Amino acid sequence: MPIPSQYDANKVENKWYDYWMKHNYFHSKPDEREPYTIVIPPPNVTGVLHMGHMLNNTLQDVLIRRARLKGYNACWVPGTDHASIATEAKVVEKLKKDGINKTDISRTEFINHAWDWTHKHGGIILEQLKKLGCSCDWERTKFTMDEDLSESVIDVFLDLYEKGLIYRGYRMVNWDPQAQTTLSDEEVNHIERTDKLYYVKYKIEGDEGFVTIATTRPETILGDTAVCVNPNDKRFTHLKGKNVIVPICNRVVPIIQDDYVDMEFGTGCLKITPAHDVNDKDIGERHNLEVIDILNDDGTLNHFGLHYQGMNRELARNEAVKELDALGVLVKTEDYTHKVGTSERTKAVIEPKISAQWFLKMKNLAKPALDNVMNDTIKFHPSKFKNSYRNWMENVRDWNISRQLYWGHQIPAYFFGEGVNDFVVAKNIEEALPLAQEKTGNKKLKKENLRQESDVVDTWFSSWLWPISVFDGILNPDNEEISYYYPTNDLVTAPEIMFFWVARMIIAGYEYRGELPFKNVYYTGIVRDKQGRKMSKSLGNSPDPIKLMEQYGADGVRVGMLMCSPAGNDLPFDESLCQQGKAFANKIWNAFRLIDGWEVADIEQPEYAKIAIDWYQNKFQQTLAVIEDHFEKYRLSDALMETYKLIWNDFCSWLLEMVKPAYQQPIDKTTYDAVITILENNLKILHPFTPFLSEEIWQHIAERSPEEALIIAKWPESKPINEALIKEFDFAAEVISGIRTIRKQKNIAFKDAIECFVLNNDKASTTFDVVISKLGNISNLSYTTEKVDGALTFRVKSNEYFVPMQGSIDVEAEIGKLTEELNYTEGFLKSVQKKLSNERFVAGAPEQVVASERKKEADALAKIETLKASLASLN
RNA sequence: AGUUCUUUAGUAGAAUGGCUAGAACGCUUGGCUUACAUCCAAGAGAUGAUGGUUCGAUUCCUUCAAGAACUACCA
C-alpha cells in the first residue's frame, strides 16, 4: 500500500493519544524506580486554552516524556484552580443574564451556581491539553476545591493562626459604593480626568496665621486628623508642635512632619485624612493619628458629615466648596488633571475604605525560601530572576489573605460579638463553640450566636500548597505518595507569578515539609502578538490553539512554539513558526518513506555506505552529548534546534544521500539494518518534541507490542565519539560544496559526471573520497602533483581541486577569484601576525591560544603559497 | 515613581575574555537531482551609543539611550 507523500497529522494524532491512554502509559504509581515529578500550574476553571498554556504545557510534556524515556517513574499531575475572583465574576455575570442579582440569593445558592458553572466549564481546558499530546496522569486530576484540598487549606489556616502568624489588621480596600462591594486591584481602572484643586486656609491655633493646603476632595476635610509638612521644609519649621483648626468642623488637629510630603507640589502642606486615602492612612499609622470615617457604604456622608449627613459625596463636595468660600478660607481653585480609580464594571469612582482583613506574617516564613533560592538549592532558569526574587523576598510585606467573595475557602473564624477580636478560629462551628464559650466566659453561648467570617481566603492561599496537597501531604504527611513524589523535580511557569505563586509554594514547602517543593523552576517567556502585546483573553488577540493544531498538527505547533522560546524570553508568536514545525514533520515523514520504499537485497555493502554509517553514528553521539547538555541547562529550544539540524541536515541531507542506492537499485541488508537502527534512535530523541509523528513512524517500522511502544522506549545510550572521523567528513563536505559551486557557476547538470584532480598539499585523508565521488558525481577523482591547465579550481584549506573544462576557461574570472581569496587571506594573516608580534600577547595569553594563533599563521601561509602559485601559472 | 532585567543580521535567538561572531526562519539567485517544491544548492546580511579595564571585549566596569516585567501611584 503506498504511503502518502504528505504527512497528515489529523489522521494520526487522535489514534496514538487513544492508544497511549488505553495502555495507561501516563499513569504512575510509586515503585522502585527513581521518580520524576511535575505538578501542573493549575489553569483557571474558567479558562480556555490560550497560547501561554500551549507553550507552558508543551515544555512540561517535553520534560516528562524525556524523563519517561530515560527510565524514570514519570508523574505529571494535572488539575485546575478555582480562581475566586475570575470565577465569581463569571458566575455573577451569568446570573445577571438570567435576571438574578448576587445580592438577592443566599451564599449557599450562589455557591451552588458556581459549582454548576465549574462542572460545566472546568474540564474544557484539560480536554484541550490532550489534543496537544500532554501525557498527564489523568487519574490524578485535582481541583483546588476538592474536599481533601479544601481541608488542607483550612488545616493550614488553623495551624498558622495557632502559631500566631495570622492576625486581623486594617487595610485600605477598593470600595465600589454603587455595587457595594470590594474590588481587587485588577478590577480598578485608573482613568485620567480633570478635576479642581482647591486651596484652603486652616487657621493656626493660638496664632493669627494660617496654613494653606491643596486638595481635590474638600468634603473629606470633615475627616481630617492632621496637617502634614516635610521636615526639611524651612517655610514651616516655625509651625512644629502647633495645631491647626479644621474649617467647617472646627476640629483641632496637629501639624505633623513626614518625608512623604513633596515640597514642590501644591503648597507643600498636606491635609491628612487617614480614613479616605491610602497614603494618608500610612502616615496616620506612623504618627498615631485618629481615623475618622465620614462615609456610609453607599457613598453618602455619615454623622461625621455634620450638616451634610445623608448627602452623596459629589454633592457634598460642591456644598463644602460653597461653605468654605463663604467662610473666606477658599484661597483659589485651579484645574487639575489626575488619575482616578474607577470600577471596571460599574464605572463608579472607587472609594478607598478601611476594612478589617486577615494577614499572614511573612518575614520569618520567607527566610528559608529566600536562602534556598539564593544558594541554588532551588535553581531558577534563567537565573537572572533570582535578583527580583531576592528584592521581593527581602522586602516582603505581610500577605493579605482575605477576599470579600463567596467562591473559595471560607475563613474558619467564628464571631461572637462586634469587636475586632470577638472571634475564635476553629475547623468548624462545633469545635468553635466551646472555644467561644471559654473566651467569653459565657457557657450559655449557642451555635446560633456564632457567625462565620464571610470572607474567603485568597486563591493563592490554596495553590501555594499545590505540590504538597495533590499528594495529600498536609492531611497525611507520612503517606507513601508524598514520601515518594515530593519534592517534585521541575516547575514550569511564568515569571509574572513568581511572587504570587512560586515564592509562596517555596515558603509552604519549607514550612510544611521542611524542604523544597521542586528542584528547578523554568520560567517561560510571555507569548506576544506581532504588535508586541501580551496575548490575553481580555484583548482577544490570541489565535485559537485548537484551530492551529488542526492546521499544523499538534507536533507542528509544539515544534513551532519551542523553536524560538528559550527560558525567560518573550515569544512574539508568528504562525510561520508552526508552518516550520509542520514542514519538519513532513520532512521526517518523507525520510521514512524513502527508507520504507527501498528494496533490500543480499548484496555486498558498498564502501561509501559503510563510511557514511560510521560517520553518522559518531555524529549522532556528538549531537546527543550536546542535546543532553542543553537539557541539563534547561535550554529546551536549543535542544530542539540541535535535534532539528541533526535530523534535517545530517540525517536527511547527508546520510540518506550518501547511502541511497542508485535509481531502482536495491540496497544491501547491512546498510538497511543500520539505517533502520539509526532511524529508531532518531525517533527516540524526537519523541519529546513530536510525540505523535515519532510514534506513528515507530509503529510503521515494525509490528510492536504495547511493551515496545516508543513512548516507553529506552533513550539512546552515550558512546565514545571518533572526533577525527567527524573532522574528516567536514573537510569532505567542503570539497563537495566546492564542486557544487562549480557546477552551479558553469550550469553543469548533476547528471553529467565530471572529473576532478586533487593537489593534496594538506595531506588530507582519503577516507571520504568514495563519498565525494558519489555526491559530486565525479567519474574520476584522481590525485596529481602538478597543477592542471584548462580547469576550474577551488581550494579547501591549502588543498587545491581542479575540474577540467571543455572549451575555454575565463582566465580573467579565475584570476579575479584567486586575487580575492589572496587578499582576504593576506589580511587575515596580517591580523594574526600582529597579535603574534605583540610580546605582551605571547607572554600573557595562555599557551593554547598562542599555539592556535601559530597554527592559523601556518595555515594562512600555506594557503597564500598555493594561491600565489596558481596566479603565477595563469599569468 | 521605585525595583529588576534586556539590547547581536529583516525577525527571533547562540557564543561568560582568545578558533575568520555559529545555527534557524525570512531574503536574493539558480535548480522538478528517481523521499519530500512543506524540497535541493549557492549567496548577501549583525554585536544600541559613549568612555574605560585588558596583549585581546559580544562577554567585565562608567555614563547615556531605547525597551520590558513587577510593585506603587501622588495631595
Image (spheres, helix red, strand yellow):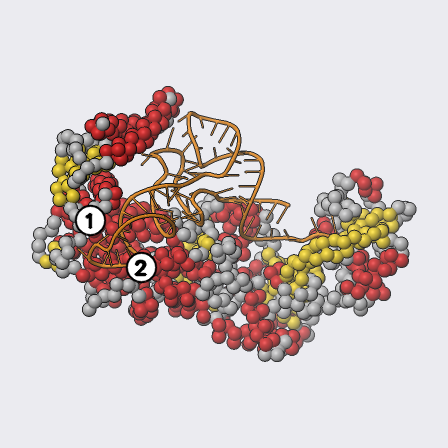
The answer to whether residue A334 of the structure is visible from this angle is: yes
Task: Tell which of A285 and A94 is nearer to you.
Answer: A94
- Outermost residue to the bottom: A99
**Residue found 24% across the figure and 27% down from its top:** A868
Query: The disc labelled 1 sits on which kind of residue?
Result: Phe
**Residue found 26% across the figure and 63% down from its top:** A5
- Label pair 2/1, CB-CB below 8 angstroms: no
Count every numbered label the image shows and give the total.
2
The chain letter for the residue carrying disc 1 is A
Coordinates of residue A774 in the picture (x, y in percent): 16, 47
**Residue found 59% across the figure and 72% down from its top:** A92
The chain letter for the residue carrying disc 2 is A
Task: Tell which of A817 and A551 is nearer to you.
Answer: A817
Q: Is residue B6 left or right of residue A3?
A: right
The secondary structure type at the circle numbered 1 is loop
Residue matched to label 2? A585
